[in-house]
Structure formats: C-alpha cells, structure tokens
C-alpha cells in the first residue's frame, strides 16, 4: 500500500510537467489507472482532503471516483476527528477582537492558521460531517465546509428578532434520510418585539438543506429560552436534545428532544442521585455529547460565578433501547475543572477544559471515579485575553459538497463588503501589517549585519599575518571570531492568516528575536572596539589599516 501511495504522490507531483500530452496519453501511461477501481478507492480513502482536492483535477477518472457520493461517505467515516476550539468575537479593554478557532489533532497538536471560512463576526452554532453552521448579525446564516472552503448563505427564518442569539440555532444530520437540518428556537415576539414572556418560545423552526423554506413546529407548551442558552443543545442520531425547566421534577429540569425525522417532541426525566452541600452554590446542569451519546453533566457552582464548577462533577449517559430509556453514571470526578466547555468536552480519552478563563488543558479519564490532580493537567494552549465563552466542538475534514443545495429558494448572495473588509477591523488589520513590516525589517537588518561582519572578519584575517607579536595576534584572532554575527535561520513568512494563539506566539518570537539581534549586535560591536584598541597598541600604521578594513 505504501508503494501505491508513493506512486500516487509521484503522479500528482509530475502532472504539471505532462501538460503538453493529451489526456488519453496521460491516462494510458498512469500505472494507478490500470489498477482495479476498488483498489484505487482504498488508496484514496487514506489521503487527506487537501490531497484529494488536488487529485480531482488530475484526470476525469480520478474526478469521478473522488466526487462519487458513496466515496465521499466512506471517506467521511475514515476521517480523523479534531477538536475545534471556537472563541467568539468580543471586547478586551474596550477594543474589539474577532471570532477565531483552533483545531487540535489526534496527537493533541494545535493548528497554526485561522479557519478561512470563519469570519471575524461569525458565531459557530454547530459542526456536522465537516460542515460548520455559522451565525451572523446580518439577515443570513452560513453553512461552510471546513476543509474545502465552500460556503452556502441562507436567509434567516425571521428578520430583526430582538434578542435573537447564535445559541438558539442548531445544526444536525439525520443518519436515515441523510439530510442536514438547521433548527431555530423562535422566541415569542410580535413584529420583531418580544412581549412580557420574552424568555419563552412556542415554536421551533426547521430548515432542511435544499428545501425552499423554513417550517414551523409548535412545542407542546411554552419552553424556556434561558435553559437552552445555559445548558446547550446537542444533536445525536437524528434527534435534537436540550434541557428545559420542569417544576414537577426533583431537580426542576428535564431533557426535551425533537425528532428531526418524525418531527415530534418527547421529554425525559433526569437522574436524581445528587447530594448537595450548603457551602457550595446552586447545582447546574449541562447537556453534552460524549462518543455519540446524550450526557448530562452536573455539579454545584460558585455562589459568585455560576460558570465556576465546585464539588463533584457527575456525568450521566442516556442509554436508548427499543424497550426503555435508562440513565447510567459514567464518571464521578472530584476536584473538577473550573469550566465545562460545550457541546463536546470529552475528546477521545481526555477531558478538554479551561483552568481560569484562558488556559485550555486536557486530563486523562482514568476511571469511573477519580480525583483530578491539577499538577498532571496538560496545558494545550493559552487563549488569553480572548478565552471568554470558549466552545469545543468535534469536527472532521470532509468532501461533502454544498453545491447541490445552492438552487434552493432561501439561498442568498453574500454581501460584497463583509468580514475583514469592514471598517471596524481596520485597526486590527493595520496592527497585523505592522508586525509583518517589523519581521521584514528585522530580516533585512540581520542580513545586512551578517554580511558586514563577515566581510570585516575576512579582511581582518588578511591583516593578522602583519602583526608580529604572537600573543597579541592570538588575542586579536579570538576577538575576530566574535565579530561575526550569527542569527537563527530566517523562515519564510506565510501569506496565510495565523489564528490568535499562533499570532501571540509569533509576536513573542518576534520580540525575542529583536532582543537577540540587539544582543548579538552589541557583542559584535564590543569585539570590533576591542580589536581596534589592540591593533592601536601594536602600531599606528596597522590602526590606519584597520580603519580602512572597517
């Protein structure tokens, strides 16, 4: 298989040099195309989306294989999973900062570059099969393929609804119908204005990608928008789940679900095995998705900050069978992390969490009952000062195409001026441009300093034989070796935009390199002055020659 992959890579690499040949000649000469189709598919299944997007343009045969819906589905099943950390736009010291995202791969390494499909004003409300659901303050929402960059702009179900929020939207996929669906909790409103029961909703609006319009479904009773916002929404196996107030229940909450296929509602009681302590604050509940199962995460919180978790953290999973639904406790964690990320905070075998409001860390799930040792937390990255309201999503890179849905009636063209082109982001862009200018000038200064000190070093070497005093000649030789300015290799600057975490690292690297340049320049200058003094003590004639050399 490795040999076949090498042949494939060679084919992609050499296709540019074969442009003068006819397609028929190229297909005939390609060894890969002589293999059975199913074997070619197996090779392609092991390649990342970025490589397959290049392979699509090699020949018609490869194009047909890669664009086949069955192959797209198989490749999606084989695709590695990423943790996507999303930071929504906000303010720091009165200055706006944009929305941003970082991908963490299976090796727990974070990405360097910004996600191009996420604009500075976008809010992420869901991730499904490599597609991202993005909310904006405009009249449109956006569905975008994370890997291919393809985007679909859709008209919102209701315009100018006061109090609308990205957390009132959800994005899911039904495994039976293979349909992608967007849902919206429509708060009670009259002509865009909320009445006295502004924190309630009676309607869920649903849009299926490719349909002509949104559909409205009335809930069995008025439900709480605040509960939706506080607990989150998850989509599992074609159903959407969220928490709602239920005063008849022991914990005053229940799980509400909406079946995307049957278009029906159901309510499930929460497990009741909790023990609260008076010295902690109120108990809070979150709904999460762990390994494709609905989970309830619960803990007491701080009296002063409802986001801060205290005491024991319990995680319960809902087992759905044809006969019954049953809750089982999956984890009981002592000394839990400060914040519970959502909608996915367990990735593979580790918890992904925040210490404080900025540091993102991971901790291994050791057993069903364990106590977290903070000294063993693994720090992944630092989002400061943009770590507020951080989200964690599971995502993959896929070949799912949005073009097939582009003819629907609610699809709209994006605005001509949007994203980074807006005036409010001018200062941000100018700041990035200044840093790039600093990098360019630093590289230029390093190059000039290296060239000048190497030239001086070489000329002094020619001067050394004229110094008759052996001791002085050796001392000058030692100092001459210190004149050459040695800088770290200059790495080419990427044209791609860095994510916020990498921007901070890049800035720290820049300032450290500037300080290093100053230190090396000062050391070289001191060495030059020392050589000048030593040559002056030997003979005035050589001193004149030294100045000529310099």
Image: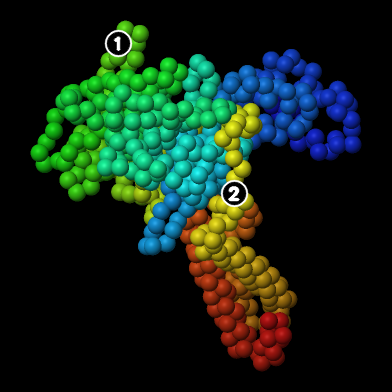
Q: Is residue 116 left or right of residue 468?
A: left
Q: Is residue 542 left or right of residue 182?
A: right
Number of marks in the image?
Answer: 2
- The x and y percentages for residue 476 are 61, 77
**How far apart are labels 1 and 2 at the CA level?**
50 Å
Quarter of the image for residue 283 reads: top left
Callout 1 touching callout 2 (CB < 8 Å): no
Q: Residue at x 55, y 78 (%)?
A: 526
Of marks 1 and 2, the one in the foreground: 2
Q: Residues within 10 Å of mark 2 (few under 14, many from 20)?
A: few
Q: Secondary structure at mark 2?
A: loop
Which residue is at the far bottom?
Answer: 540
Eyeballing the image, is 375 above or below 256? below
Label 1 environment density (alpha carbons within 10 Å; few <14, some 14–19, many ≥20): few
Q: Is residue 432 positioned above or below 284 on the image?
A: below
Quadrant of residue 361 within the rendered picture:
top left
Please name the colour scheme applied to the rendered image: rainbow
Give the labeled residue for mark 1: 324
Using the image, determine if residue 113 lies above or below residue 328. Answer: below
Disc on res. 415: 2
Q: Residue at x 23, y 44 (%)?
A: 306
Q: Residue at x 53, y 30 (%)?
A: 213
Closer to us: 539 or 205: 205
Give whichever of discs 1 and 2 has the lower sequence position: 1
Query: Where does the image place residue 119, in percent across and percent down from the top left?
Result: 53, 48
Which element type, helix, strand or loop, lies under badge 1?
loop
Q: Which quarter of the image is occupied by the C terminus?
A: bottom right
362 or 308: which is nearer to us?
Answer: 308
Residue 330 seen in render = no
**Viewer-proximal residue, 257 or 379?**
257
């Amino acid at each position: 298989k490795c040999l076949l992959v090498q042949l494939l890579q060679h084919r992609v690499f050499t296709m540019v040099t074969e442009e003068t040949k006819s397609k028929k000649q190229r297909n005939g000469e390609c060894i890969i195309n002589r293999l059975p189709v199913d074997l070619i598919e197996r090779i392609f299944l092991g390649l990342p989306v970025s490589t397959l997007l290049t392979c699509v343009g090699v020949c018609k045969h490869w194009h047909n294989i890669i664009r086949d819906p069955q192959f797209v589905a198989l490749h999606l099943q084989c695709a590695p999973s990423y943790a996507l950390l999303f930071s929504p736009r906000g303010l720091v010291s009165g200055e706006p900062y944009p929305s941003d995202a970082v991908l963490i791969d299976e090796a727990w390494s974070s990405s360097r570059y910004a996600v191009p499909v996420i604009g500075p004003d976008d809010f992420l409300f869901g991730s499904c099969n490599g597609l991202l659901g993005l909310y904006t303050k405009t009249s449109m929402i956006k569905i975008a393929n994370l890997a291919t960059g393809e985007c679909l702009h859709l008209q919102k179900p209701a315009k100018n609804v006061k109090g609308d929020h990205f957390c009132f939207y959800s994005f899911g996929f039904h495994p039976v119908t293979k349909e992608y669906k967007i849902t919206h909790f429509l708060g009670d409103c009259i002509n865009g204005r909320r009445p006295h029961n502004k924190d309630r909703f009676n309607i869920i609006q649903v849009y299926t990608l490719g349909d002509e319009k949104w559909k409205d479904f009335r809930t069995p009773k008025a439900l709480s928008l605040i509960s939706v916002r506080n607990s989150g929404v998850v989509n599992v196996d074609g159903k959407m789940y969220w928490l709602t107030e239920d005063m008849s229940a022991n914990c005053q909450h229940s799980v509400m679900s909406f079946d995307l296929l049957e278009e029906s509602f159901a309510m499930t009681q929460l497990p009741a095995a909790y023990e609260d302590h008076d010295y902690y604050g109120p108990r809070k509940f979150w709904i999460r998705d762990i390994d494709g199962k609905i989970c309830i995460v619960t803990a007491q919180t701080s009296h002063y900050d409802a986001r801060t978790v205290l005491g024991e953290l319990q995680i319960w999973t809902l087992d759905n069978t044809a006969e019954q639904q049953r809750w089982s406790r999956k984890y009981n964690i002592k000394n839990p992390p400060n914040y519970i990320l959502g909608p996915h905070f367990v990735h593979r075998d580790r918890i992904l969490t925040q210490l404080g409001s900025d540091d993102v860390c991971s901790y291994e799930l050791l057993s069903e009952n364990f106590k977290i040792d903070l000294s063993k937390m693994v720090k992944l990255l630092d989002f400061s000062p943009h770590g507020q309201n951080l989200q964690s999503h599971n995502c993959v890179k896929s070949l799912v195409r949005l073009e097939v849905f582009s003819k629907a009636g609610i699809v709209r063209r994006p605005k001509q001026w949007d994203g980074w082109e807006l005036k409010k982001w001018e200062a941000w862009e100018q700041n990035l441009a200044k840093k790039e200018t600093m990098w360019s000038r630093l590289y230029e200064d390093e190059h000039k300093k290296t060239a000048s000190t190497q030239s001086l070093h070489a000329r002094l070497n020619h001067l050394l034989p004229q110094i008759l005093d052996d001791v002085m000649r050796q001392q000058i030789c030692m100092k001459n070796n210190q004149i050459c300015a040695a800088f770290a290799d200059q790495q080419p600057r990427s044209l791609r935009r860095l994510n916020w975490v990498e921007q901070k690292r890049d800035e720290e690297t820049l300032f450290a390199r500037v300080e290093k340049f100053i230190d090396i320049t000062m050391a070289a200058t001191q060495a030059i002055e020392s050589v000048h003094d030593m040559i002056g003590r030997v003979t005035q004639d050589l001193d004149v020659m030294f100045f000529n050399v310099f």
